[in-house]
Image (cartoon, rainbow, N blue to C red):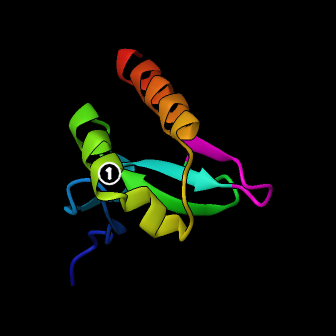
Amino acid sequence: MSNTRKMPQRKCVGCQEMKNKKELIRVIRTAEGEFLLDATGKKNGRGAYLCPSRECFQKAVKSRGLERSFKQAIPKEVYDALEKEMEALETE
């Protein structure tokens, strides 16, 4: 019997690829309706996952993947704020 642990798999809303949960960035909608990046993966709220790349973020915006996951329209200002947060994570 193998002792390897199963890693949770999640689908990127941009490229639609299944990847390990730890490889993806979680975007959450809080109960107050605010959208945030969740680097820890432990914040409360409805979540959607993205690859940590600009290309996947652009695909998610173009295909409305985040809107589909959250079942609501997302204002352009939110996309701009999320893009700035992702750029900050890429430079770290």
Name the quarter where the N terminus is drawn: bottom left
Tell which of 87 and 78 is nearer to you.
78
Please provide percent x and percent y for residue 83: 44, 30
Q: Residue at x 36, y 60 (%)?
A: 65
16 relative to 49 in the view: left or right: left
Residue at 35% x, 47% y: name it.
61
Classify mark 1: helix, strand or loop: helix
User: Which residue in the rendered view is the most extreme toward the right?
Assistant: 32
Give coordinates of residue 44: x percent, y percent.
70, 59
* Residue 39 visible here: no
Magenta highlight on residue 71: no
Residue behind mark 1: 60
In percent of the image, x 80 and y 55: which residue is there?
A: 32
- Is 34 contained in the magenta span? yes
Up/down of 50 relative to 11, above or below: above
Indicate whether 76 appears above or below 2: above
Side of 29 where 25 appears, left or right: left
> What's the amino acid at mark 1?
Ala
In the rendered image, residue 18, in percent from the top left (x then y), is placed at 23, 65
- Residue found 48% across the figure and 38% down from its top: 79
Which quadrant of the structure image shows residue 78?
top right
Q: Is residue 4 visible?
A: yes
Crowding around mark 1 (Cα neighbors within 10 Å: few <14, some 14 to 19, many 20+) is many
Quarter that holds the C terminus:
top left
Instruction: Please state the horizontal and vertical placement of residue 51, each as a whole percent of the image.
Output: 30, 45
In this picture, which residue range is highlighted in magenta?
Answer: 30-40
Q: Main secondary structure of the magenta part?
A: loop
Q: Is residue 68 above or below residue 79?
A: below
Q: Depth check: 50 or 9 in front?
A: 50
